[in-house]
Amino acid sequence: MLKQNKKFIVPLLLLLLLMLTACGEKEKTDNAAAEQNTKEAKTKTVQTINGEMVIPTNPKRIVAEEYIASLLVLEVKPVGAPGLALENFYLKEALKGVEEIGDYGKPSIEKIIALKPDVIITGNGENYDALSKIAPTVVIPYGELKNAHEELTYFGELLGKEQEAKDWLAQYDQKIADAKAQVDAIIPEGASFSIIEDAGKTYYAYGDNFGRGGQPVYQALGRKPPAKVADEIMEKQWAEISEEVLSDYAGDYIILTSDDRTVEDFKNDPIWGSLPAVKNDHLYVWPEERSWYYDPTAVLAQVEELTNWLTNKK
């Protein structure tokens, strides 16, 4: 009888053993798959000028050489930034507590390493090799993102904050539209605008993507440079000009960057004082501190400032 039972017990035990082994293997496989899925959920692959790159889905420690305002708009505060960015007139308060990493374009590798970033963002590809050894480095070349929409949309997708970017841009567009309507109601459509910088012994005229007021005037408010130089200015984005040809670049309205001279100084200058824009009190002088920056936050503030001037609001 015992021998007869063994014929059934032994195969049954083997079957149970096989079932337990199979269950164990399935559990291991399931756990491995779950772990892989979790890992994949924590990272994503993005396309950059340096090829595909794996970055954290929600980076917590970003060192940013450029595009810092867009990060702040999306409620992402970098842990490190260049000294020039920390001096940004429009971002100073929001960047309190952010560590300085050195000069723009020449950051301190040691300082960046100490910050233990999980992503580095820069507009300068020259340091890519050194930076990419520290953390995944996303290079967006200077001038590639040409306006607030391109910039916010790009970083919304990069950081998984697409909706936040859309919401902010909707408010941005409404504020710009309101400002443009105010200006259009007062300033003739054909009036030309010049963006100029006083560099001491010489002057520079700028296009719509080089700061000094180009973004708010040409992009946001939709104004145009003098027809004679419009193609040159918009294609090259800048031109060095002397006083001898100043009248060619001077529009009906002039937005002028100068740290050392006032409107009265230019009115009393024999060459500047002869320009129609200066004679008609259509000259606006502001310092580098406010005119140089052209990030989305700066542009919005500059649009408000220039609209108040153009519509004679105090």
Image (cartoon, rainbow, N blue to C red):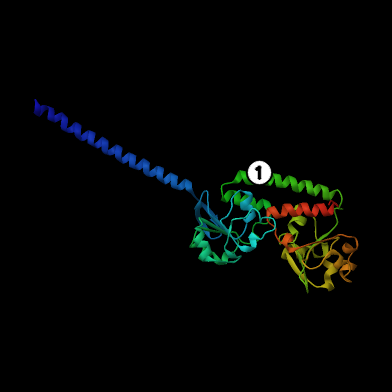
What residue is rendered at 26% in x and 39% in y? 21
Looking at the image, is 181 positioned above or below residue 134?
Answer: above
> Which residue type does callout 1 highlight?
Asp
Q: Where in the figure is residue 178, as x and y percent of width and height?
A: 78, 46
Describe residue 128's horizontal placement relative to residue 153 as left or right. left
Q: Which residue is mark 1?
A: 167
Describe residue 66's horizontal placement relative to residue 267 as left or right. left
Crowd tier of the residue under label 1, counting other residues whose Cα lies within 10 Å: few below 14, some 14–19, many 20 or above: few
Is residue 77 shown to the viewer in this render? Answer: yes
Looking at the image, is 1 positioned above or below residue 278?
Answer: above
Describe residue 166's horizontal placement relative to residue 251 as left or right. left
Task: State the quadrant of the N terminus.
Answer: top left
Q: Where in the figure is residue 162, as x and y percent of width and height?
A: 60, 45
What residue is rendered at 60% in x and 51% in y? 155
What residue is rendered at 72% in x and 54% in y? 299
What residue is rendered at 16% in x and 33% in y? 10
Q: Where in the figure is residue 151, as x and y percent of width and height?
A: 64, 53
Q: Where in the figure is residue 2, as x and y percent of width and height?
A: 9, 27
